[in-house]
Image (cartoon, rainbow, N blue to C red):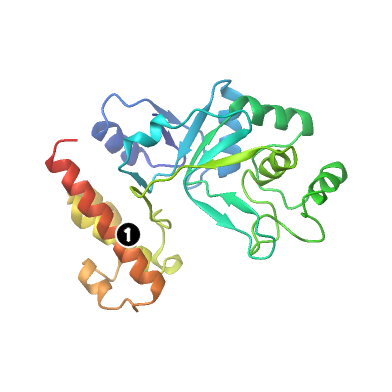
Amino acid sequence: MFLIFNGAKSWEQDLLLKEFKGRPALKLFTLPRSSINHGEVINLFFHANDKNFGIIDHDLYIFDPDIFKKLTFKNDQFMKAIFRGENRYSGMLYPHTFFLFFNTPQLKRIMMEYHVDARVYKKVSPDIKSKLAEIGLSNGRFIKDYINYFDTLHVMLALSYLEGWEVDYLDTDAVFHLGGTSMGSQYAKDLSHMYISMCFLEYVNNPLLKEKYLPYLAPFTSSEQIRQKLVPTPDVIHMKNTLHSILSLVQKHELEGL
């Protein structure tokens, strides 16, 4: 497993390399205070790899090691995923990018044959447009029903569907994804995301992290202050249950020395 630094600050990189000693790491060249788009990073990985590989979000927590024993593809599979979404109107399923494992030869063939890649597409060429229409992606219809473009990997995904290939969804109850955990201005974060960040800061209890990240969570100084302001909607309840399940499992694994 490699750590990919995409816009991480120097002190963050140093801290992670110290925490994960011996873990291979790759620093992507970025302009100050910026990062490279997800699709372009995935393109880089495809160009650099002939063998199958995968990607895991920084805020995905895997407590089921058997997942990594289930990454062999059958003949009609081009991707493995854990989480999925469904288009409300067409019923088309699509994998979320939190955890993906790629049948690299198949996807590189799609890239070369159709001259497409993993980036976001607001428009596609006329040839690709006619191909996508064969599976119902025409007249302003996209894989996700709530956006008006093809998201990361979605053009490659659609063309693989067109050829009759499938995504294999791995079944597990021991993988959790939080989402929205990248640090940023409190003006761009809702209370749920601030609560997540504060809970992790309190759990890790690292003086350097507190010094660097607490200003992003002002005016709050504790998770309890944020918790009191959370409205108990279904989404908030789900977030809290997921978060505290993760923290409990992390603590359990640390106590067991795993």
Dot 1: few (<14), some (14–19), or many (≥20) neighbours within 10 Å?
some
Q: Secondary structure at mark 1?
A: helix
Residue at (54% x, 40% y) in the render: 168
Say which amino acid is labelled 1.
Answer: Thr
Residue ID at (86%, 42%): 127
Q: Which residue is mark 1?
A: 242
Horizontal side of residue 199 vs 160, given as left or right: left
Q: What quarter of the picture does the N terminus occupy?
A: top left
148 or 202: nearer the eye? 148
Residue at 17% in and 46% down: 252
Q: Where residue 35 sits: x, y (%)?
A: 51, 44
Q: Find residue 229 and report its horizontal and vertical position in percent.
A: 30, 78
- For image coordinates 12% across by 42% down, the residue present is 255
* Farthest-out residue, left: 255
Q: Is residue 9 visible?
A: yes
Residue 205: x and y in percent read 17, 51
Residue 245 in the figure: left or right of residue 102 = left
The number of numbered discs placed on residues in the rendered structure image is: 1
Quadrant housing the C terminus: top left
Horizontal side of residue 92 vs 197, given as left or right: right
